Image: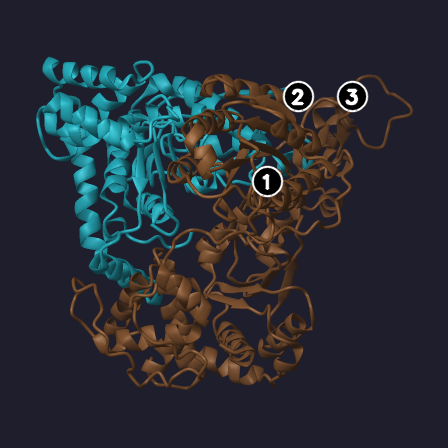
Amino acid sequence: MTARLAWSDAVAALQLFAVDPAGSGGVLLRSRAGPVRERWLKMLRAALPAEQSVRTIPLHIADGRLLGGLDLNATLLAGRPVAERGLLAEADGGVLVLAMAERLSSATLVHITAAMDARETIVERDGLSLRMPARFGVIALDEGLDDEFAPAALRDRLAFHVDLNGIPTGDAEEFVMDSGEVSMARERLKALKAGKGQVEAMCSAAAALGITSLRAPLLALRVACASAAFDDHITVEQDDIASAARLVLAPRALVFPDADQPEQQEQPPEPPSDPAAEDDRPDTDRPDFDRALDEVILAAVQAALPPDVLAVLRASSGRSRARSQGKAGALQKSGKRGRPAGVLRGDLRAGAKLNVIETLRAAAPWQPLRRREAAMNAGMSARPRILVRKDDFRLSRFKQRTETTTIFVVDASGSAALHRLAEAKGAVELLLADCYIRRDQVALIAFRGSVAELLLPPTRSLARAKRSLAALPGGGGTPLAAGLDAAFALSESIRRKGHTPTVVVLTDGRANIARDGGQGRPRAEEDAISAARQLRSAGITAVLVDTSPRPGASGETLAREMGARYLPLPHADAAILSKAVLASVG
Amino acid sequence: MAIAFPFSAIVGQDDMKLALLIAAVDPKVGGVLAFGDRGSGKSTAVRALAALLPRMKVIVGCRYNCDPDRPAEFCDDCRARAGKGALKSVQMPVPVVDLPLGATEDRVVGALDLERALARGEKAFEPGLLARAHRGFLYIDEANLLEDHLVDLLLDVAASGENVVEREGLSIRHPARFVLVGTGNPEEGELRPQLLDRFGLSVEVKTPDDLPSRIEVVRRRDEFENDSAAFIARWDGEERKLRKKITSARDRLPSVTVTDAALERAARLCMALGTDGLRGELTLMRAARALAALEGAKTVTDDHLRRVAPSALRHRLRRNPLDDAGSSVRVDRAIAEIFG
């Protein structure tokens, strides 16, 4: 698919989103900040009717601002509680822009998704209990690199997934948007409904593409209605279904049902009315309904997929692709402070940080009471203007880098497999259980053959970790450098999220594959050492567990260069190993 | 309140629906936890429950939903008033109270009534979410992401059935017995073991994977969103039927007998699985009895036990990270051994 085509899809998504912002959920806009994204956003603003509000949620928004709460100023002035609307309620009937959605904290995310599901916000804060309507469409700006994505719970709820990366500015032609047309389409939308056969076809197409979430076909159907409204169709037509499938289902596709369809993607999308592909699909147990429409949908999806993606889907490897080599980004200099993470009632102990506003907010309602009380207790002459007591103290909590992510880098090469891959797996499982108890996150990188693979991105799910570990095969060369590079890149991305990475390497230290995939022990070892130094210079806590039968110099040198604690493992079993690693990680 | 999707119109998800119905028949079962895939209708089912449940009798003017037929459980207010004369009662819908994740502690346990404090300088207690949920359901969406200090608070109240507030001259205690309903997605993090144990039943929810039911889900959802009033009217008959079933099951519940043989089976099952404490057996027995009542049976049979065992015991097994088999598989294995 060419860049121009990608851009025209992006524009189509924009228009359909403008027709039904809340119904379609929104747009996941994956793109670096830049002129192309700016142009897209500018066109969106032009397409939306003028009265429609567009609000932006900054990344570190406090809960109070997001949900609303007590308006301190107005409350003190009025002498009665005055509620302040939060951003979610303010966005009602409009569009909400999420900046840097790939780094959205789960706490903020759940509020947004809850409001999207219920179409209202429920506030239980500061002595207030409010329900406010909140129907909005979301534009999630996702600037993630490589494996960094906006949270899945959010992606699932957004109909359109648009990727602007790779579209040169020159190809991003600016179109004139007509908000009047959008307003008219919105009127027409009210009367439109997808037919029964269309619902069935969309569901079966989604299933054939390996999309499990039922939100996908639902969103696609709504987008089809929006498309019909926009093109002034009286009913939802085949074209509408096809373009909805292209925009909504294609980016979510996990598998592609037929295996021997020749590539025909470099051409512009085939007119969807032309039922291409007369292949027989393998799944015959599908109910027998509008098969033609089914194929139209699949053809539309296929046309929207770039050939390389299609190839990957056809192979249906299911595994995540090998991580690209990490770039040593500018190291984030972190002070003692973390991200603000809400307030708590508490005592002013040493080190606690008083949150003045929240304290005043807590003290505000008590003022008339306390004043009267103070007046009764003998007429003190010089009374403070505001009576604050110990109970009012609110302390800011910061999420410090206490949340640890332990990255296991497991050598699954032939030499290690021979020796003690099973034992290493056992140890990792024990450590996983410990991580679970301490609520740490874990990630798993394995290296073998010529590449390192991120088998498990950071997760707190014990089940997933166990599954991916169990599936880890052994054999092949020892690309130690690639493994350490992957660990370094992942550490960096974890740090950017404000967590602390800890790397646990299990290897026999016998590198024989260099960074460029070339064979040869000396070069491979050199590369491994330089990768190890990278970890040390970044100051990442590391442990190296030497799993070779006769632990020796190579492991020790590597540990020294890595700044890691060295743990030889001559005859230790999984339990001893787990204890040793825990002791050094702390 | 937003209009809820009718409970009986939910396609599939039988485990979850059954668990919620059991909790509705016998609140003592102790809460339902539904963990599973995104977009599989967990929240929909819980919200639908609110509309489904038969109304309950409460004392007029009581802020804690006291039950006029149970004077032993009155709050202080009602006790004082009961001394003075007869209390009037009124029918109200069973509360299904949302505990939103951003809730502040004050709102959960109750706090000073702001309006009165500011305007009139009076010290008065304004009940929080726990008070409102008394005799009803407390629903936590994304329970696994709930803040720790709120979890602690909930654990305490759920264990004692009473909420105690002590703050600057306010000293209040009131009954707070509710059925905890939690939902969540395990991929986003697991639940703290202490909280896990408080739930009586736990169910795993999956998106249906057969095409006809997937189509049916999407179709009904689509219809509901296009014209919710008409959709609800169409399902009203089914809802009534189900409501009646719950009411009569509640009436029947005390008369359902549990034989010694059934008790022994339950005990053997728990022993085989090595569940901690007696909570597992109790829940298993209560859930089986509620199921029997729902189905109009007079005694608890093996079949009832067998059907509720996975959800009553699944989350109580001691975690063994080295055992690859999931908890459900272990429960199924034990059931097969004991029931043959």
Q: Is residue A397 left or right of residue A18?
A: right
**Chain displayed in brown:** A
Instruction: Give how far across and how far down residue B43 sits, in percent.
Output: 38, 46
User: In the image, what residue type sits under mark 1?
Assistant: Arg
Residue at image x 32%, y 47%? B48
**The C terminus of chain A: image quadrant:** top right
- Residue B198 is situated, as x and y percent measured from the top left of the image, at 39, 25
Please report the residue visible at 26 percent of the width from the left and 46 percent of the height from the top.
B13
In the image, is A63 to the left or to the right of A221?
right
> Which residue is depicted at the point 64% across and 19% down?
B169
Residue that label 2 marks: B168
**Badge 1 is on which residue?**
A125
Q: Quadrant of residue B111?
A: top right
- Chain under callout 1: A
Task: Specify the amino acid type for callout 2.
Answer: Glu
Above or below: residue B155 compared with residue A362 = above
Residue at numbered disc 3: A350
The one nearer the camera, A531 or B258, is A531
Distance CA(mark 3)–CA(mark 2): 23 Å
Of tags 3 and 2, the one toward the viewer is 3
Mark 3 and mark 2 residues within 8 Å of each other at the beta carbon: no
Q: Residue furthest right?
A: A382
**Residue B300 % position (x, y):** 12, 24
Q: CA distance from mark 3 to mark 1?
A: 28 Å
* Mark 2 to mark 1 CA distance (whole Å): 19 Å
Colour assigned to chain B in the rendering is cyan
Tell which of B322 and A273 is nearer to you. Answer: B322
Amino acid type, callout 3:
Ala
